[in-house]
Image (cartoon, rainbow, N blue to C red):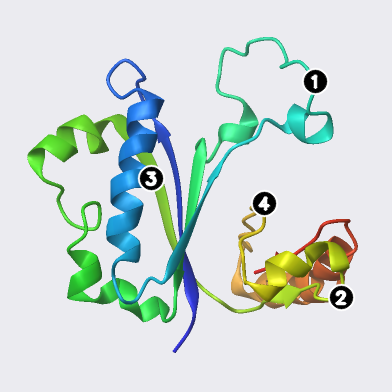
Amino acid sequence: MVQGTLYVSSATLDETKLPPSKFVTWYENIHVDEVVDLPGVPAATRYEAIPLHQLTDPRAAAPSTPTEPPSWLAFGGWLTLYEFNDIAYRKTDEFLALDGQSEPKPELLNSVFKNAWFNTRFMGAVQVDENPASALNAPYHAARRPAPLVITAFIQPKDEAHAAEIDKWYRAEHVPLLSKVRGYVRTR
Protein backbone atom coordinates (compact mmCIF):
# COMPACT_ATOMS: atom_id res chain seq x y z
CA MET A 1 0.00 0.00 0.00
CA VAL A 2 1.43 3.37 -1.06
CA GLN A 3 -0.10 6.53 0.35
CA GLY A 4 -0.55 9.22 -2.20
CA THR A 5 -2.05 12.46 -3.35
CA LEU A 6 -4.29 13.43 -6.21
CA TYR A 7 -3.07 16.85 -7.36
CA VAL A 8 -5.64 18.85 -9.34
CA SER A 9 -4.87 22.38 -10.47
CA SER A 10 -7.69 24.14 -12.27
CA ALA A 11 -8.74 27.35 -13.95
CA THR A 12 -11.71 28.72 -15.85
CA LEU A 13 -11.13 29.12 -19.58
CA ASP A 14 -13.73 31.75 -20.42
CA GLU A 15 -15.16 33.80 -17.57
CA THR A 16 -18.19 34.81 -19.66
CA LYS A 17 -19.21 31.15 -19.99
CA LEU A 18 -18.09 30.01 -16.55
CA PRO A 19 -17.60 32.79 -14.01
CA PRO A 20 -14.97 31.90 -11.40
CA SER A 21 -17.56 32.26 -8.61
CA LYS A 22 -19.79 29.63 -10.25
CA PHE A 23 -16.82 27.30 -10.79
CA VAL A 24 -15.65 27.68 -7.19
CA THR A 25 -19.17 27.10 -5.85
CA TRP A 26 -19.53 23.87 -7.85
CA TYR A 27 -16.01 22.64 -7.06
CA GLU A 28 -15.98 23.43 -3.33
CA ASN A 29 -19.63 22.66 -2.47
CA ILE A 30 -20.35 19.70 -4.73
CA HIS A 31 -17.33 18.09 -6.38
CA VAL A 32 -14.92 17.99 -3.42
CA ASP A 33 -17.69 16.57 -1.22
CA GLU A 34 -18.41 13.81 -3.75
CA VAL A 35 -14.74 12.84 -3.79
CA VAL A 36 -14.12 12.85 -0.03
CA ASP A 37 -17.36 10.91 0.55
CA LEU A 38 -15.54 7.95 -1.01
CA PRO A 39 -13.93 5.58 1.51
CA GLY A 40 -10.49 5.75 -0.14
CA VAL A 41 -10.18 9.55 -0.07
CA PRO A 42 -10.26 10.73 3.56
CA ALA A 43 -9.43 14.41 3.05
CA ALA A 44 -8.93 17.25 0.60
CA THR A 45 -7.44 20.72 0.87
CA ARG A 46 -8.16 23.49 -1.61
CA TYR A 47 -5.87 26.45 -2.25
CA GLU A 48 -6.12 29.60 -4.35
CA ALA A 49 -3.07 31.01 -6.14
CA ILE A 50 -1.49 34.08 -4.59
CA PRO A 51 0.36 36.47 -6.90
CA LEU A 52 4.09 36.29 -6.22
CA HIS A 53 4.33 40.02 -5.51
CA GLN A 54 1.88 39.55 -2.62
CA LEU A 55 4.02 36.84 -1.04
CA THR A 56 6.90 39.25 -0.57
CA ASP A 57 4.76 42.29 0.33
CA PRO A 58 1.00 41.84 0.85
CA ARG A 59 0.46 45.59 0.32
CA ALA A 60 2.30 45.65 -3.01
CA ALA A 61 0.39 46.79 -6.06
CA ALA A 62 -0.06 44.33 -8.87
CA PRO A 63 2.39 44.71 -11.73
CA SER A 64 1.08 46.30 -14.91
CA THR A 65 -1.52 44.22 -16.70
CA PRO A 66 0.23 41.56 -18.76
CA THR A 67 -0.96 40.44 -22.19
CA GLU A 68 -0.58 36.80 -21.11
CA PRO A 69 -1.55 35.12 -17.84
CA PRO A 70 1.13 35.69 -15.19
CA SER A 71 3.66 32.89 -14.71
CA TRP A 72 2.32 32.12 -11.23
CA LEU A 73 -0.90 30.96 -12.92
CA ALA A 74 0.89 28.47 -15.17
CA PHE A 75 -0.83 25.61 -13.38
CA GLY A 76 -4.18 27.29 -12.74
CA GLY A 77 -5.69 29.59 -10.17
CA TRP A 78 -6.77 26.83 -7.80
CA LEU A 79 -5.13 23.71 -6.43
CA THR A 80 -6.86 20.84 -4.67
CA LEU A 81 -4.87 18.12 -2.94
CA TYR A 82 -6.81 14.93 -2.22
CA GLU A 83 -5.27 12.48 0.25
CA PHE A 84 -5.35 8.78 -0.59
CA ASN A 85 -4.67 6.08 2.01
CA ASP A 86 -3.64 3.89 -0.93
CA ILE A 87 -2.95 5.48 -4.32
CA ALA A 88 -4.19 2.27 -5.98
CA TYR A 89 -7.72 3.39 -4.98
CA ARG A 90 -7.67 5.56 -8.11
CA LYS A 91 -8.28 2.41 -10.17
CA THR A 92 -11.40 1.29 -8.31
CA ASP A 93 -14.85 1.36 -9.90
CA GLU A 94 -16.05 3.74 -7.15
CA PHE A 95 -13.41 6.34 -7.94
CA LEU A 96 -13.62 5.93 -11.71
CA ALA A 97 -17.38 6.59 -11.56
CA LEU A 98 -16.80 10.20 -10.43
CA ASP A 99 -17.55 13.05 -12.84
CA GLY A 100 -14.24 13.92 -14.42
CA GLN A 101 -12.84 10.42 -14.07
CA SER A 102 -15.65 9.25 -16.32
CA GLU A 103 -17.80 11.18 -18.81
CA PRO A 104 -19.75 13.83 -16.84
CA LYS A 105 -23.48 14.24 -17.27
CA PRO A 106 -24.24 16.44 -20.34
CA GLU A 107 -25.33 19.51 -18.33
CA LEU A 108 -22.19 19.38 -16.15
CA LEU A 109 -20.01 18.66 -19.17
CA ASN A 110 -21.32 21.75 -21.00
CA SER A 111 -21.48 24.12 -18.03
CA VAL A 112 -18.22 23.22 -16.24
CA PHE A 113 -15.92 20.70 -17.91
CA LYS A 114 -15.90 22.35 -21.36
CA ASN A 115 -15.21 25.74 -19.77
CA ALA A 116 -12.53 24.78 -17.24
CA TRP A 117 -9.03 23.43 -17.41
CA PHE A 118 -7.81 20.66 -15.09
CA ASN A 119 -4.25 19.43 -14.61
CA THR A 120 -4.62 16.11 -12.80
CA ARG A 121 -1.70 14.11 -11.39
CA PHE A 122 -1.72 11.04 -9.17
CA MET A 123 1.37 10.89 -6.99
CA GLY A 124 2.53 8.07 -4.75
CA ALA A 125 4.45 9.15 -1.66
CA VAL A 126 8.19 8.44 -1.84
CA GLN A 127 9.41 10.79 0.90
CA VAL A 128 7.90 12.90 3.66
CA ASP A 129 10.01 15.33 5.68
CA GLU A 130 8.53 17.33 8.53
CA ASN A 131 9.81 19.90 10.97
CA PRO A 132 8.13 18.82 14.23
CA ALA A 133 10.65 20.70 16.38
CA SER A 134 9.30 24.07 15.34
CA ALA A 135 6.85 25.49 17.90
CA LEU A 136 5.49 27.75 15.14
CA ASN A 137 4.34 24.67 13.22
CA ALA A 138 2.94 22.66 16.14
CA PRO A 139 -0.75 23.19 15.19
CA TYR A 140 -0.14 21.74 11.74
CA HIS A 141 1.61 18.62 13.04
CA ALA A 142 -0.59 17.78 16.01
CA ALA A 143 -3.81 17.67 14.00
CA ARG A 144 -2.20 16.86 10.63
CA ARG A 145 -3.79 20.09 9.43
CA PRO A 146 -2.89 21.38 6.00
CA ALA A 147 -0.25 24.04 5.70
CA PRO A 148 -1.62 27.56 5.10
CA LEU A 149 0.64 27.98 2.05
CA VAL A 150 1.75 25.40 -0.50
CA ILE A 151 4.55 25.77 -3.00
CA THR A 152 4.63 23.17 -5.74
CA ALA A 153 7.56 22.23 -7.93
CA PHE A 154 7.94 19.52 -10.52
CA ILE A 155 11.32 18.11 -11.44
CA GLN A 156 11.60 15.89 -14.50
CA PRO A 157 14.98 14.20 -14.96
CA LYS A 158 16.07 14.00 -18.57
CA ASP A 159 16.76 10.28 -18.20
CA GLU A 160 16.93 7.47 -15.63
CA ALA A 161 20.63 8.05 -14.99
CA HIS A 162 19.89 11.57 -13.75
CA ALA A 163 16.92 10.51 -11.61
CA ALA A 164 19.10 9.02 -8.85
CA GLU A 165 21.36 12.07 -8.93
CA ILE A 166 18.39 14.44 -8.56
CA ASP A 167 16.89 12.31 -5.79
CA LYS A 168 20.18 12.36 -3.87
CA TRP A 169 20.47 16.16 -4.24
CA TYR A 170 16.83 16.65 -3.26
CA ARG A 171 17.09 14.55 -0.07
CA ALA A 172 20.61 15.59 0.99
CA GLU A 173 20.63 19.29 0.10
CA HIS A 174 17.33 20.75 -1.06
CA VAL A 175 14.94 19.52 1.64
CA PRO A 176 17.34 20.32 4.52
CA LEU A 177 17.70 23.84 3.11
CA LEU A 178 13.91 24.27 2.79
CA SER A 179 13.37 23.01 6.33
CA LYS A 180 15.32 26.01 7.66
CA VAL A 181 12.80 28.49 6.26
CA ARG A 182 10.65 30.11 8.96
CA GLY A 183 7.20 28.54 8.90
CA TYR A 184 8.27 25.37 7.08
CA VAL A 185 5.85 22.54 7.82
CA ARG A 186 6.65 19.62 5.53
CA THR A 187 7.92 18.46 2.17
CA ARG A 188 6.20 15.59 0.37
Q: Secondary structure at mark 3?
A: helix
Farthest residue in the left direction?
106
**Dot placed on the residue nearer the N-terminal end, 3 or 2:** 3
Q: Of the residues under marks 4 and 3, which one precedes in the sequence? A: 3
Query: Looking at the image, is mark 2 or mark 1 nearer the viewer?
Result: 2
**For the residue carrying disc 1, how many other residues have a C-alpha within 10 Å: few (<14), some (14-19), or many (20+)?**
few
Q: Could you say which disc has been placed on residue 60 in the image?
A: 1
According to the image, label 4 marks what residue? 148
**Marks 4 and 1 in Cβ contact (< 8 Å):** no
Camera-side mark, 4 or 1: 4
Crowd band around label 4 with a 10 angstrom C-alpha radius: few (<14), some (14–19), many (20+): few
How many marks can you see? 4
Kind of residue indicated by mark 3: Glu
**CA gap, disc 2 and disc 4:** 18 Å
Check whether the beta carbons of the residues at disc 2 and disc 1 lie within 8 A of each other: no
CA distance separating discs 3 and 1? 29 Å
> Which element type, helix, strand or loop, lies under badge 1?
loop
Q: Looking at the image, tell me whether mark 2 or mark 4 is earlier in sequence order.
A: 2
- Do the residues bearing badges 2 and 4 touch, measured as CB atoms within 8 Å? no
Q: Quadrant of the C terminus?
A: bottom right
Image height of 47 relative to 93, above or below = above
User: Going from the N terminus, do you reach mark 2 or mark 1 first?
Assistant: 1
Image coordinates of residue 90 in percent, x first then y, are 32, 72
Image location (x, y in percent) of residue 86: 41, 81
In the visual, does 186 lie left or right of 144? right
For mark 2, what is the residue? 133
Identity of the amino acid at label 1?
A: Ala
